[in-house]
Image (cartoon, helix red, strand yellow):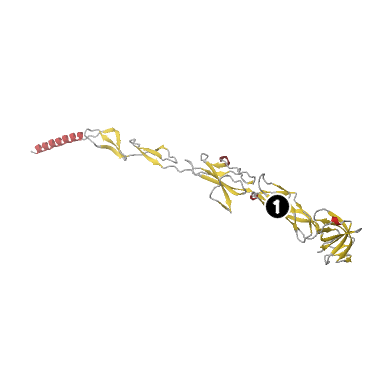
Amino acid sequence: MKKKIIGMISLMLCLLLSVSLVACNNNKHEAKSEWKYNDTQHWHECATKGHDDKLDEAEHVWDEGVITTPATTTTPGVKTYTCTVCDKTKTEPITILAKTEGTVSINSSYAPDKTYDKTPVAAPVLADCTTNNAEGAFSIAWYQKVDGVYGSTPLAAAPVNAGDYKVVVKIAETDDYTEATAEKEFTITKKQLTVTGTIVADKNYDGNTTANVTVGTVNGVVEGEDVTVSASGTFASAAVGNDITVTVTYLISGADSANYLAPETDATLTADILDYAKFTITSKTTVPGRGTAVDGTVDGGIINVGDTFTLFRAAGGSLTVQVSAIMVDGTAVKSVTPETKGTVTLLLRGISESDVAVGDYLIKGNAVIKG
Protein backbone atom coordinates (compact mmCIF):
# COMPACT_ATOMS: atom_id res chain seq x y z
CA MET A 1 0.00 0.00 0.00
CA LYS A 2 2.78 2.30 0.93
CA LYS A 3 4.61 1.63 -2.34
CA LYS A 4 1.46 2.31 -4.30
CA ILE A 5 1.10 5.74 -2.77
CA ILE A 6 4.71 6.61 -3.50
CA GLY A 7 4.24 5.58 -7.12
CA MET A 8 1.21 7.75 -7.51
CA ILE A 9 3.02 10.76 -6.11
CA SER A 10 5.90 10.23 -8.54
CA LEU A 11 3.50 10.07 -11.45
CA MET A 12 1.87 13.29 -10.42
CA LEU A 13 5.23 15.07 -10.15
CA CYS A 14 6.13 13.96 -13.66
CA LEU A 15 2.85 15.30 -14.99
CA LEU A 16 3.39 18.70 -13.30
CA LEU A 17 6.95 18.95 -14.67
CA SER A 18 5.70 18.23 -18.18
CA VAL A 19 3.04 20.95 -17.97
CA SER A 20 5.61 23.47 -16.68
CA LEU A 21 8.01 22.79 -19.53
CA VAL A 22 5.24 23.31 -22.08
CA ALA A 23 4.21 26.67 -20.48
CA CYS A 24 7.82 27.96 -20.40
CA ASN A 25 8.26 27.21 -24.07
CA ASN A 26 5.05 29.04 -24.94
CA ASN A 27 6.28 32.35 -23.05
CA LYS A 28 9.74 32.51 -24.59
CA HIS A 29 10.80 36.24 -25.55
CA GLU A 30 13.05 37.05 -28.44
CA ALA A 31 13.94 40.75 -29.02
CA LYS A 32 13.77 42.30 -32.46
CA SER A 33 16.98 44.06 -33.57
CA GLU A 34 15.39 47.44 -34.40
CA TRP A 35 15.00 49.95 -31.58
CA LYS A 36 11.68 51.56 -30.99
CA TYR A 37 11.39 54.84 -29.09
CA ASN A 38 9.34 57.81 -28.06
CA ASP A 39 10.47 61.22 -26.76
CA THR A 40 11.71 59.85 -23.44
CA GLN A 41 12.41 56.10 -23.78
CA HIS A 42 13.59 53.37 -26.15
CA TRP A 43 12.95 49.57 -26.28
CA HIS A 44 12.99 46.41 -28.38
CA GLU A 45 9.75 44.78 -29.45
CA CYS A 46 9.32 41.04 -28.66
CA ALA A 47 9.64 38.90 -31.80
CA THR A 48 7.47 36.06 -30.35
CA LYS A 49 4.21 35.80 -32.24
CA GLY A 50 1.34 37.26 -30.37
CA HIS A 51 3.59 39.09 -27.88
CA ASP A 52 3.59 42.88 -27.43
CA ASP A 53 6.17 42.98 -24.68
CA LYS A 54 8.77 45.84 -24.56
CA LEU A 55 12.19 44.46 -24.00
CA ASP A 56 15.26 46.44 -22.81
CA GLU A 57 13.03 49.47 -22.09
CA ALA A 58 15.05 52.42 -20.69
CA GLU A 59 15.41 56.24 -20.67
CA HIS A 60 17.30 57.82 -23.54
CA VAL A 61 20.99 58.52 -23.02
CA TRP A 62 21.73 61.84 -24.74
CA ASP A 63 25.14 62.84 -26.03
CA GLU A 64 26.62 66.37 -25.59
CA GLY A 65 24.84 67.60 -28.68
CA VAL A 66 25.98 69.24 -31.91
CA ILE A 67 25.15 72.76 -33.15
CA THR A 68 23.40 72.08 -36.41
CA THR A 69 22.29 75.71 -37.02
CA PRO A 70 24.48 78.43 -35.48
CA ALA A 71 22.68 81.30 -33.79
CA THR A 72 23.13 84.82 -35.15
CA THR A 73 22.24 88.27 -33.83
CA THR A 74 19.00 88.13 -35.85
CA THR A 75 17.93 84.46 -35.77
CA PRO A 76 18.09 81.71 -33.09
CA GLY A 77 20.22 78.63 -33.65
CA VAL A 78 19.53 74.89 -33.24
CA LYS A 79 21.43 72.27 -31.21
CA THR A 80 20.74 68.58 -31.93
CA TYR A 81 21.19 65.79 -29.35
CA THR A 82 21.36 62.05 -30.23
CA CYS A 83 20.64 59.08 -27.95
CA THR A 84 23.79 57.01 -27.74
CA VAL A 85 21.73 53.80 -27.57
CA CYS A 86 18.94 54.11 -30.13
CA ASP A 87 19.98 57.12 -32.29
CA LYS A 88 16.80 59.01 -31.42
CA THR A 89 17.40 62.78 -31.85
CA LYS A 90 15.98 65.88 -30.25
CA THR A 91 16.61 69.59 -30.82
CA GLU A 92 16.82 72.64 -28.59
CA PRO A 93 16.88 76.30 -29.70
CA ILE A 94 19.99 78.44 -29.19
CA THR A 95 19.26 81.99 -28.04
CA ILE A 96 19.85 84.85 -30.49
CA LEU A 97 23.35 86.23 -29.98
CA ALA A 98 23.79 89.64 -28.35
CA LYS A 99 25.27 92.29 -30.65
CA THR A 100 28.79 93.49 -29.97
CA GLU A 101 28.85 97.04 -28.66
CA GLY A 102 29.89 99.31 -31.49
CA THR A 103 32.75 101.74 -30.86
CA VAL A 104 33.99 104.80 -32.73
CA SER A 105 36.41 107.64 -31.98
CA ILE A 106 37.57 110.63 -33.98
CA ASN A 107 41.31 110.60 -34.61
CA SER A 108 43.42 113.51 -33.40
CA SER A 109 44.56 114.06 -36.98
CA TYR A 110 41.14 115.51 -37.75
CA ALA A 111 41.56 119.13 -36.60
CA PRO A 112 38.60 121.35 -37.57
CA ASP A 113 39.69 124.38 -35.52
CA LYS A 114 40.33 127.31 -37.84
CA THR A 115 40.28 131.09 -38.25
CA TYR A 116 37.32 132.51 -40.10
CA ASP A 117 37.90 132.52 -43.86
CA LYS A 118 34.35 132.46 -45.27
CA THR A 119 34.62 128.75 -46.15
CA PRO A 120 32.85 125.85 -44.39
CA VAL A 121 34.68 123.51 -42.04
CA ALA A 122 35.93 120.32 -43.68
CA ALA A 123 33.72 117.39 -42.70
CA PRO A 124 35.24 114.23 -41.18
CA VAL A 125 35.11 110.98 -43.15
CA LEU A 126 35.32 107.37 -42.04
CA ALA A 127 39.08 107.43 -42.56
CA ASP A 128 39.29 110.12 -39.86
CA CYS A 129 37.81 107.71 -37.30
CA THR A 130 38.65 104.46 -35.57
CA THR A 131 35.78 101.96 -35.28
CA ASN A 132 35.16 98.25 -34.79
CA ASN A 133 32.25 98.36 -37.24
CA ALA A 134 33.47 99.65 -40.57
CA GLU A 135 30.42 98.11 -42.26
CA GLY A 136 28.00 100.44 -40.49
CA ALA A 137 26.61 103.43 -42.38
CA PHE A 138 28.64 106.58 -41.58
CA SER A 139 26.95 109.94 -40.98
CA ILE A 140 27.73 113.29 -39.33
CA ALA A 141 25.82 116.17 -37.73
CA TRP A 142 26.92 119.70 -36.74
CA TYR A 143 25.81 121.62 -33.64
CA GLN A 144 26.51 125.18 -32.49
CA LYS A 145 27.01 126.30 -28.91
CA VAL A 146 24.87 129.31 -28.00
CA ASP A 147 25.13 130.90 -24.57
CA GLY A 148 27.25 127.96 -23.44
CA VAL A 149 24.75 125.27 -24.51
CA TYR A 150 24.58 123.12 -27.63
CA GLY A 151 21.19 123.09 -29.32
CA SER A 152 19.35 119.85 -30.01
CA THR A 153 18.70 120.67 -33.66
CA PRO A 154 21.65 120.07 -35.99
CA LEU A 155 22.80 122.74 -38.43
CA ALA A 156 21.73 122.42 -42.03
CA ALA A 157 25.33 122.41 -43.26
CA ALA A 158 28.93 122.60 -42.12
CA PRO A 159 29.52 125.83 -40.16
CA VAL A 160 31.14 128.87 -41.75
CA ASN A 161 30.82 131.71 -39.27
CA ALA A 162 32.93 132.29 -36.17
CA GLY A 163 31.72 130.46 -33.07
CA ASP A 164 31.93 127.31 -30.96
CA TYR A 165 30.73 124.06 -32.49
CA LYS A 166 30.87 120.28 -32.29
CA VAL A 167 30.66 117.57 -34.91
CA VAL A 168 28.98 114.25 -34.05
CA VAL A 169 29.86 111.16 -36.09
CA LYS A 170 27.64 108.07 -36.07
CA ILE A 171 28.24 104.49 -37.16
CA ALA A 172 24.82 102.90 -37.74
CA GLU A 173 23.76 99.60 -36.17
CA THR A 174 24.45 96.45 -38.19
CA ASP A 175 23.58 92.77 -37.74
CA ASP A 176 26.59 92.27 -35.48
CA TYR A 177 27.20 95.69 -33.83
CA THR A 178 25.19 98.30 -31.97
CA GLU A 179 25.15 101.94 -33.02
CA ALA A 180 28.17 104.02 -31.99
CA THR A 181 28.73 107.79 -31.80
CA ALA A 182 31.60 110.16 -31.04
CA GLU A 183 31.90 113.93 -31.00
CA LYS A 184 34.60 116.58 -31.26
CA GLU A 185 34.34 120.22 -30.21
CA PHE A 186 36.03 122.95 -32.20
CA THR A 187 36.12 126.70 -32.69
CA ILE A 188 36.06 128.97 -35.70
CA THR A 189 38.03 131.93 -34.37
CA LYS A 190 37.19 135.49 -35.39
CA LYS A 191 39.69 136.89 -37.85
CA GLN A 192 41.99 139.54 -36.43
CA LEU A 193 42.08 142.77 -38.43
CA THR A 194 45.07 145.10 -38.54
CA VAL A 195 45.53 148.68 -39.70
CA THR A 196 48.59 150.34 -41.18
CA GLY A 197 49.10 154.02 -41.82
CA THR A 198 46.64 155.49 -39.32
CA ILE A 199 47.19 159.22 -38.84
CA VAL A 200 46.47 161.41 -35.83
CA ALA A 201 46.16 165.11 -36.64
CA ASP A 202 47.77 167.86 -34.64
CA LYS A 203 45.20 170.09 -33.02
CA ASN A 204 44.85 173.48 -31.47
CA TYR A 205 44.76 173.64 -27.74
CA ASP A 206 41.16 173.21 -26.58
CA GLY A 207 41.54 171.95 -23.04
CA ASN A 208 40.53 168.33 -23.76
CA THR A 209 42.29 165.12 -24.83
CA THR A 210 40.14 164.22 -27.86
CA ALA A 211 42.20 163.46 -30.96
CA ASN A 212 41.18 163.50 -34.62
CA VAL A 213 42.06 160.11 -36.16
CA THR A 214 42.13 159.09 -39.82
CA VAL A 215 42.05 155.30 -40.17
CA GLY A 216 44.75 153.91 -42.44
CA THR A 217 44.65 150.78 -44.61
CA VAL A 218 42.59 147.95 -43.11
CA ASN A 219 44.13 144.49 -43.57
CA GLY A 220 42.47 141.09 -43.21
CA VAL A 221 38.91 141.57 -44.47
CA VAL A 222 37.93 138.71 -46.77
CA GLU A 223 37.15 139.95 -50.25
CA GLY A 224 33.54 140.99 -50.64
CA GLU A 225 32.79 141.19 -46.91
CA ASP A 226 30.99 144.20 -45.44
CA VAL A 227 33.27 145.38 -42.62
CA THR A 228 34.01 148.99 -41.70
CA VAL A 229 36.70 150.12 -39.26
CA SER A 230 36.41 153.41 -37.37
CA ALA A 231 38.63 154.85 -34.66
CA SER A 232 38.77 157.28 -31.79
CA GLY A 233 41.88 158.80 -30.25
CA THR A 234 42.85 160.17 -26.85
CA PHE A 235 45.86 162.34 -26.08
CA ALA A 236 47.81 161.35 -22.98
CA SER A 237 47.64 165.01 -21.90
CA ALA A 238 45.44 168.01 -22.73
CA ALA A 239 48.33 170.44 -22.34
CA VAL A 240 50.23 172.08 -25.18
CA GLY A 241 53.11 169.92 -26.31
CA ASN A 242 54.85 168.06 -29.09
CA ASP A 243 54.79 164.31 -29.84
CA ILE A 244 52.15 163.58 -27.24
CA THR A 245 51.19 159.88 -27.15
CA VAL A 246 47.73 159.24 -28.57
CA THR A 247 45.90 156.02 -27.78
CA VAL A 248 43.84 154.93 -30.78
CA THR A 249 40.92 152.57 -30.23
CA TYR A 250 39.34 150.83 -33.22
CA LEU A 251 35.73 149.77 -33.68
CA ILE A 252 34.21 147.60 -36.40
CA SER A 253 30.76 147.57 -37.96
CA GLY A 254 29.03 146.15 -41.01
CA ALA A 255 26.94 143.12 -41.94
CA ASP A 256 29.89 140.71 -41.65
CA SER A 257 31.67 142.29 -38.68
CA ALA A 258 30.66 139.49 -36.27
CA ASN A 259 33.31 137.28 -37.88
CA TYR A 260 36.16 139.70 -37.16
CA LEU A 261 38.11 141.18 -34.28
CA ALA A 262 38.72 144.92 -34.36
CA PRO A 263 42.35 145.98 -34.74
CA GLU A 264 44.12 146.10 -31.42
CA THR A 265 44.37 149.39 -29.55
CA ASP A 266 47.41 151.34 -30.71
CA ALA A 267 49.39 153.50 -28.26
CA THR A 268 52.40 154.14 -30.51
CA LEU A 269 51.09 157.18 -32.38
CA THR A 270 51.82 160.79 -31.44
CA ALA A 271 50.58 164.25 -32.33
CA ASP A 272 51.00 167.86 -31.18
CA ILE A 273 48.69 170.15 -29.27
CA LEU A 274 49.53 173.56 -30.69
CA ASP A 275 49.78 176.89 -28.83
CA TYR A 276 47.49 178.85 -31.15
CA ALA A 277 45.50 181.78 -29.91
CA LYS A 278 42.14 182.69 -31.34
CA PHE A 279 41.79 186.12 -33.03
CA THR A 280 38.32 187.23 -34.11
CA ILE A 281 38.30 190.09 -36.62
CA THR A 282 35.12 192.17 -36.57
CA SER A 283 36.19 194.98 -38.96
CA LYS A 284 39.18 196.14 -41.00
CA THR A 285 40.53 199.46 -42.33
CA THR A 286 43.41 200.31 -44.66
CA VAL A 287 45.95 202.69 -43.15
CA PRO A 288 47.82 204.22 -46.08
CA GLY A 289 51.52 203.60 -45.90
CA ARG A 290 51.29 201.61 -42.70
CA GLY A 291 49.25 198.53 -43.48
CA THR A 292 45.84 197.40 -42.32
CA ALA A 293 44.13 198.04 -39.00
CA VAL A 294 41.90 195.21 -37.82
CA ASP A 295 39.45 195.40 -34.97
CA GLY A 296 38.50 192.35 -32.92
CA THR A 297 39.25 190.28 -29.86
CA VAL A 298 42.11 188.05 -28.81
CA ASP A 299 41.36 184.87 -26.85
CA GLY A 300 44.10 182.86 -25.23
CA GLY A 301 47.32 184.62 -25.98
CA ILE A 302 49.62 187.57 -25.43
CA ILE A 303 50.39 189.92 -28.32
CA ASN A 304 53.03 192.59 -28.08
CA VAL A 305 53.85 195.55 -30.29
CA GLY A 306 56.60 194.39 -32.63
CA ASP A 307 55.53 190.74 -32.59
CA THR A 308 55.72 188.82 -35.81
CA PHE A 309 53.38 185.87 -36.17
CA THR A 310 51.60 183.69 -38.68
CA LEU A 311 47.93 184.34 -39.27
CA PHE A 312 46.08 181.18 -40.40
CA ARG A 313 42.94 181.89 -42.35
CA ALA A 314 39.87 179.66 -42.06
CA ALA A 315 39.54 179.54 -45.83
CA GLY A 316 43.08 178.23 -46.14
CA GLY A 317 46.51 179.67 -46.52
CA SER A 318 48.41 181.89 -44.12
CA LEU A 319 49.97 185.32 -43.77
CA THR A 320 53.07 186.45 -41.96
CA VAL A 321 52.30 189.73 -40.21
CA GLN A 322 54.00 192.18 -37.88
CA VAL A 323 52.20 194.17 -35.20
CA SER A 324 53.26 197.82 -35.47
CA ALA A 325 50.72 199.24 -33.01
CA ILE A 326 48.02 198.09 -30.58
CA MET A 327 45.03 199.97 -29.27
CA VAL A 328 42.33 198.89 -26.82
CA ASP A 329 39.10 200.87 -27.09
CA GLY A 330 41.10 203.57 -28.92
CA THR A 331 43.92 203.77 -26.39
CA ALA A 332 47.43 202.78 -27.44
CA VAL A 333 48.94 199.93 -25.43
CA LYS A 334 52.11 197.89 -25.64
CA SER A 335 50.42 194.46 -25.40
CA VAL A 336 47.22 192.56 -24.88
CA THR A 337 46.72 189.49 -22.71
CA PRO A 338 43.89 187.04 -22.15
CA GLU A 339 42.72 189.34 -19.39
CA THR A 340 42.44 192.34 -21.74
CA LYS A 341 38.92 193.69 -22.01
CA GLY A 342 37.44 195.75 -24.82
CA THR A 343 37.93 196.03 -28.57
CA VAL A 344 41.46 195.42 -29.69
CA THR A 345 42.82 197.14 -32.77
CA LEU A 346 45.96 195.77 -34.32
CA LEU A 347 47.87 197.65 -36.96
CA LEU A 348 49.33 194.92 -39.13
CA ARG A 349 52.24 195.80 -41.37
CA GLY A 350 52.82 193.96 -44.61
CA ILE A 351 49.25 193.13 -45.60
CA SER A 352 46.45 194.88 -47.41
CA GLU A 353 42.80 195.06 -46.50
CA SER A 354 41.97 192.53 -49.18
CA ASP A 355 44.25 189.96 -47.55
CA VAL A 356 41.96 189.47 -44.59
CA ALA A 357 38.24 189.08 -44.05
CA VAL A 358 35.95 189.40 -41.08
CA GLY A 359 35.88 186.17 -39.07
CA ASP A 360 37.87 183.89 -36.81
CA TYR A 361 41.59 183.36 -37.19
CA LEU A 362 44.28 181.42 -35.40
CA ILE A 363 47.58 183.03 -34.66
CA LYS A 364 50.89 181.46 -33.83
CA GLY A 365 54.16 183.14 -33.02
CA ASN A 366 54.70 185.25 -29.99
CA ALA A 367 51.16 184.61 -28.83
CA VAL A 368 51.30 182.31 -25.81
CA ILE A 369 48.32 180.28 -24.59
CA LYS A 370 47.55 180.90 -20.93
CA GLY A 371 46.65 178.13 -18.51
Residue at 27% across, 33% down: 32
Viewer-proximal residue, 27 or 314? 314
Residue 28, compared with residue 337, is above or below; it is: above
| Numbered disc 1: secondary structure | strand
User: Looking at the picture, how far across and down is residue 107, in whole percent?
Assistant: 58, 43
Q: Mark 1: which amino acid?
A: Ser
Q: Residue at image x 56%, y 42%?
A: 130
Task: Judge from the rendering whether residue 83 lies leftward or rightward of residue 286; answer left or right.
Answer: left
The residue furthest left is 1
Tell me if I can see residue 319 in this picture: yes
Residue 208 in the image: x percent, y percent?
Answer: 76, 60
Q: Residue at the location (29% across, 38% down)? A: 57
Q: Residue furthest right?
A: 289
Residue 356 lies in what quarter of the image?
A: bottom right
Read off the residue under disc 1.
230
Name the side, left or right, on which 345 lies relative to 74. right
Please state, as top left, top right, bottom left or bottom right, where the N terminus lies in the image: top left
Q: Position of residue 216 (x, y in %)?
A: 74, 49
- Residue 132 can be seen, yes or no: no
Location of residue 330 in the rendering, given as x and y in whole percent from the top left corner: 87, 66
> On the rendered structure, is 48 left or right of 9?
right
Which quadrant of the figure contains the C terminus? bottom right
Quick one: 214 or 98, which is closer to the camera? 214
- The residue lying toward the viewer, choosing from 114 and 101, is 114
